[in-house]
Image (cartoon, grey):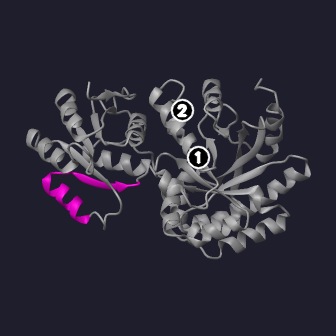
Amino acid sequence: MSYQTLYKPKDLQTKPSVKILAIDDDPLLLSTIGLILDEQGYKVCIAEDGLKGLRSYRLEQPDLVITDLQMPVKDGLDTIKLLRTWSPQLKIIAICGGSLASNHDLLHRATELGASAVMCKPFDADQLVETVTNCLDVERSLETPIPLVATDLMQAIAEDQLFLEYQPALDYRLERITGVEALVRWRHPVHGIIRPDKFIALAEESALIHHVTDWVVASAARQVAEWHADNLDLAVSVNISARDATDADLPERLCGYCRDAEIAHASMTLELSENAAMRVAIEGNSVLQQLRLLGFGLSVDDFGTGISSRLELTGTPFTEVKIDRFFTATMASSHESWIAVETMVDVARNLDLGCVAEGVENAATLDALREIGCSAAQGYFLSRPLPADQIAQVTRRYSPGKRRQ
C-alpha cells in the first residue's frame, strides 16, 4: 500500500473521526508529525511523496493534509492543486524548509493554489498542534487561566515564592545517577503551586526572564555545592530561554553564581529548546560559544520536536541532546517510535554528543534505550521531580550494579 496508518485516536469524544494525511520525503519528519498528532488524538496517515500522497488521499479521505512543497516525483504545488480540485473544502497545510522570507514566492503560490496555512521548518510541537487546531477549528476545552501579571512574578522572586525540584538522570555507562534537572515552581499564596508552563511566558513577555533564570541558576549552584559537601557527586541542568541566550552579560553572571557556590562550571548544563537552540546557533550566537569555552555544558532540549537536522547541529557548541518524551513514551510498543529514537541516538553518537532520553516511564523503555546506546535516561520510572533533600535516597537506589527495587 502507498500509505501507512500509524496511530489510532486516543480521545474519540474530543476528536471523533478527524483524520490527517502527512506527505513528506523525510521519514523522520513524518514519524515526528505522526507522534505529535497522535498524542492529540488524531488518526494519522503518511506518504513519502506527492504521488503516493494523492493515492493515499483517495483511499483515506482525510480531513486535513499536511504536505511538503519540495519533494521528488510530484512536488507540493502540484499536489495541492489536484487536492483542491478534488475537494474544494479540504484543509491543507503547506510546509517547507527555510524562512518565510526566503520562501515568500513559493508559499505565496501555495496559498494561491489553496493552502489553508503555511509553516516553515524547523517548527516545534506547539506550533504544529496550534496550526492544525486552527485549520480544523477544533473546539478545545481550556483550563481556567490563572490571572497573573508581571508584578506578581516580581513579588514572587523578591519573597522567595519560587522553589526548585530536581529530577534525576541515570547514566547508563556508569550505572548510577550522575545529574539532575532543576525544575522551577511557584508557590503562590492564593493559587497554590504553579508549574512553569503557566508563568514562563509571562516572564519572557515582561522581560523578567533574566531574573527568573538568575534565581534558578544561583539556587541550583548552591544546592550542587551542598550535595558535593555531602559526597554526592551530581551535576545539574537548568533551562534557559532564547532571550537568555542572547544576553551578553549572561556568561559573567553564571560564572559569578558558580564562583559564589564554589562549584566548577562543568557541574552545570544549560538547556535550550530545540527550536530556540537551532535559531540562535545558526545565527552564530557568541553567548553560547562563550559559555561553552567557559566549560558549561549546553543541551538541546525536546530534541526531535523542532525537527532540526544533523547538518544544523554540526559545528554548534552543544554538548548534548535530550530526546523528547513524545518518542520515548511509546518506543517500547511502536516500531516507528523505536526507529525515531534510534536515529536520534545515532545522530548524537556520530557528532560525539551526549544523548539523554526524557519521559522514561517503564522498565521496557529503560532497557530499550540501553540497548540502542543512549547515554542517559530521565523520567518517572526512575524518579519524579523531588525536593533536594530526597535526591540522596534516589542515588542510593541506583548505585552501580543495582536495579530499582
Question: Disc 2 to disc 1, how far (Cα)?
Answer: 24 Å
Residue bearing the label numbered 2: 329
- 123 horizontally vs 170: left or right: left
The quadrant of the picture occupied by the C terminus is top right
* Residue 317 sits above or below residue 93 on the image: below
Residue 390 found in image quarter: top right
* Crowding at mark 1 (Cα within 10 Å: few <14, some 14-19, many 20+): few
Q: Residues within 10 Å of mark 2 (few under 14, many from 20)?
A: some
Residue 315 left/right relative to 296: left
Q: Is residue 171 visible?
A: yes
Residue, disc 1 = 350
Per the image, label 1 sits on a secondary structure element best described as: helix
Q: Is residue 123 above or below residue 389?
A: below
Q: State the count of labels.
A: 2
The amino acid pointed to by label 2 is Ala
Q: Which residues are magenta?
A: 104-122
Q: Quadrant of residue 250?
A: bottom right
- Where is residue 1? Give x, y as percent: 26, 24
Which of the 4 image quarters holds residue 218? bottom right
Tell whether position 13 is magenta: no
The answer to whether 76 appears left or right of 313 in the picture is left
Residue at image position (86%, 64%) is: 262
- Residue 153, x across and y down, in percent: 60, 64
Q: Amino acid at mark 1?
A: Asn
Classify residue 257 as left or right of residue 227: left
The secondary element bearing badge 2 is classed as loop
Camera-side residue: 222 or 323? 323
Above or below, 57 relative to 264: above
Which of discs 2 and 1 lies nearer the camera? The answer is 1
